[in-house]
Structure formats: structure tokens, C-alpha cells
Amino acid sequence: MAQDIIPIELGLPQGDLVTLWAPRWREDGEEWEAFLGDEDALYAFPDAAHLAAYVRTAEQHDLIDHPAWEAVPELNVPELIPDDDHSYDLVDVPQMVAEEPDSWTLSELADIVGIVRSLADVCELEEVHEILDSCEGFSLLDQGQLPFTGREGARLWDDLSRTVSEKWDTILDTIDELVTVPEVDAATLEQTAEELAAFHEESAAAEAGVDTEDEDLDTVDADTEEDDEDEDDEPVGFWAEVGIDPIKIVLSEQEYYTLRCYLDDEPVFLGSDGRIEAFTSPKALARKLADGGELANTDLADVSTWDEVLTKATAGELEIVVDPDNTYVLTGLDSDIADGPDAIDPTQLELAVELLTDTADWVGDDSVATALSTSESLGWLVSFVLRPDPTRLTPSAPFDAEQKAWRGLVDTFEDRLHVN
């Protein structure tokens, strides 16, 4: 399956440089991966203007035969600016491993090691592979904090930190030596530099406009404060008041009902130990809450308003009403994925991804985030459907691998349901 070509930024000893990366794609029954370059050289540029000037005029390089290449020279300069998710600061790795392995650090390191492995694969950097394979911790970064907890986890982190201290400079030097900054057409560069400058000016003006607008809104808010207070006095419903949402999950065999809320932006479900308490009807859920028992001590017990829910249920006054935005229909998505992007309902997919991601976050499972990352074929397909872009190449069939990966995520989710 042909994938996109992505602008990336590499933080190297010689500075921050931008280039292009084509993640794995399938063509003629074979898998390929490539970077912008020519044979043993990796082409990189000081900014998006130089990159744009090159791709608009270059006639020979390693990406010229990529199925999506014809769209790249048509991109404007801002579209060639790497986003935060594709900026890899290789120079900062020693400082990162000097800190405790929190989730942000591990995620950042996993992304950096992933792009380094890709460079090593494409450019045949055996010494880089040997260094990364010499320490088990490098292969466990995408699993999050779990492998690095406890005594054994501390040992893994110490080994990884020591390897970085002793050998990361070798990786940096090896990749740095690959980089070539090609000359670009002067007239084209003048044009692309103007485009980049105009983009930065517009961005600065837009930001300044937001600041001005905020000041104006403060004045308007002061004038309408009394009206807002009157509106705030209106009832918003019991579930909105307690900050907990009833949710409905539609699977192939059955509909299920449960509860979920967010504490400090982290999802919390009705359940414990990674098991969601699910019910086949709203009444069954309400009755179980009224009984108290084991549901009184689920993870939702940490919510300050939980006792209000139990009190209302015990009094027989609790009504389970599900908002449409909290209805998750997983049925049929695997078949739609097999048929391709045009068959997939973006709203249905977005809600399903939200449910699977929330559940995985709640139990501390990184498998969903990994499967839906843009470096995986399923993640590319999901990204294409949820964030359409006319400059992107439409994914091509077959979608068997994507369907299988999606079914695996849904099966794992179903296994977490404890049906009452």
C-alpha cells in the first residue's frame, strides 16, 4: 500500500535540518521505505523554503519513483514544514535519559529511536543497528512506563542510559556524516523564501489578532456577565452536574451500557483492574448501582460525586440516559475498513477510536496508540479518513492487514468487558 511522503525535522550536531521520509509502503508485492536522498547521501535542508525549492526543480533522487511523489512538488511551503509529531531531536537524547522515565520522555524517545532505526534500515547503517540491539530497553520504549517500573525496570533504564552515554555519539556522527545539503535553484529559492516569510507574517498577525480578540471578549464578557449567570442557573441535568457520562457500546452481538468520566483529563471507567463493568440495558445498570456491593468500590469511587450517583440509584431515582456523542458503534467497522476509506463513516470511526483509546489509557496499555500511530498501516488509514487532505495519496487495496489489526484492537476491548 502506498503511503504518504512526510516532512520531518532531524536535530543533528550540524543543526536542525528538514527532509522527507516515506514510511513503509507496498508496491508490486514488496515493502519499501525511503528518505529524500541519492544512494548513500541523505538530503536535508536548513528550512522548508530550501526543501521546497529543491523538490520543485530536482529531477533525480531516491523518492522520484514513489507513488505519491507527483503531489510533492505541488505542495506550498507551509505544507513542507514538519509538525511537532515529526520533529526528532537526536542531539537531546543524552539529556532525556538523564531524567526519570516518565510517559512523555518514553514516548519522545520511542519516536526518535524509531526514526533512527528507519534511517539505519534504509541507509544500511549496521553499526547503528548493533548499538540499538545491544540494549533491550530500546525495543521496549513504545510500551510506555510498564517495562521500566520496579527493580527490573530500573535496571533496564540504567542499561539504556549507560548505552546512550557511551555510544550515542557514534549514532549521531554516523547519521551526521550521511547528510548532504544540495544546492538549489536561486530563483526558485527566492520565491519559496518569500512564501515562508509570508506564512510567518500571517501566523504572527493571526496570533496578535487572537490576543486583541481576547481583550475585546473580556469587555463583552463583563457587559454580559449577568446574562451568563442567569443561564448558569438553568439545570444541566444530573449526569452533567456530577461529571460522569453513561455510555452505550454497540458490538456485533449485543449493546452494552456502562459509565465513564475524566479525572484530570484521564479517562476512568466503571470497573477496576482493567475490567469494565458492562450491562445489557440501562435498567440493569441502574439496578446494580442501587444494590451497591462491588460497584461501590470501582475506580469511579475516586470521583467526588460518586456518592451522589449511588444515593440517587438507591432511592430509585437514577435514570440512565445516553447522549448521542457517547454512543459507540463498533459493529461493521472491520468490514468497512476492508472495503477502503470511501466505505468508512468518519464519525463512527472517530468515536470508535475514542473509545478504544480511552480504554487503553485507563488500563495503561500502549497497544492502541502503537497500532494507530502513523508509522503503522492501520494508523495511516485512520489518519487519512479522520484528517482528509487533498494532497495525500489515497490508500490502495488490499486492506487485509488493516482489517486484521482493527479486529485485534476490538477483540482486546471486548475481552475487557465484564458483562453483568
Image (cartoon, rainbow, N blue to C red):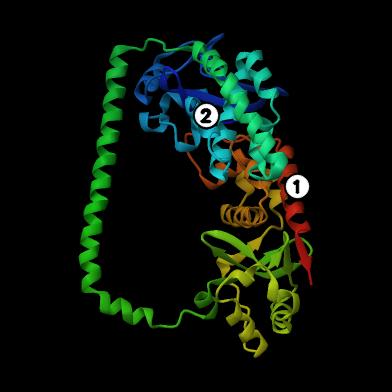
- Residue drawn at x 29%, y 34% as measured from the top left: 199
Mark 2, residue position = 93
Give SS at disc 2: helix
Horizontal and vertical percent position of residue 66: 57, 21
Horizontal and vertical percent position of residue 324: 57, 68
Please tell me whether mark 1 or mark 2 is closer to you in this view: 2
Quadrant of the drawing holding the N terminus: top right
- Mark 1 residue type: Gly
- Using the image, tell me which numbered label, if any, was put on residue 408: 1
- Residue drawn at x 60%, y 80% as measured from the top left: 307
**Which quadrant of the figure has residue 348?**
bottom right
Give SS at disc 1: helix
First in sequence: mark 1 or mark 2? 2
Tell me if residue 66 comes above or below residue 417 in the rendering: above
Between 174 and 324, which is closer to the camera in this rendering? 174
Q: Is residue 1 visible?
A: no
- Residue drawn at x 49%, y 15% as measured from the top left: 176
Q: Is residue 220 left or right of residue 281?
A: left
Tell me if residue 85 comes above or below residue 344 in the rendering: above
- Mark 2 residue type: Val
Horizontal and vertical percent position of residue 41: 52, 10
- Determine contact: label 1, label 2, CB under 8 Å: no
- Using the image, tell me which numbered label, if any, was put on residue 26: none
Question: Callout 1 environment at 10 Å: few (<14), some (14 to 19), or many (20+)?
Answer: some
Quadrant of the drawing holding the C terminus: bottom right
Between 95 and 286, which is closer to the camera in this rendering? 95
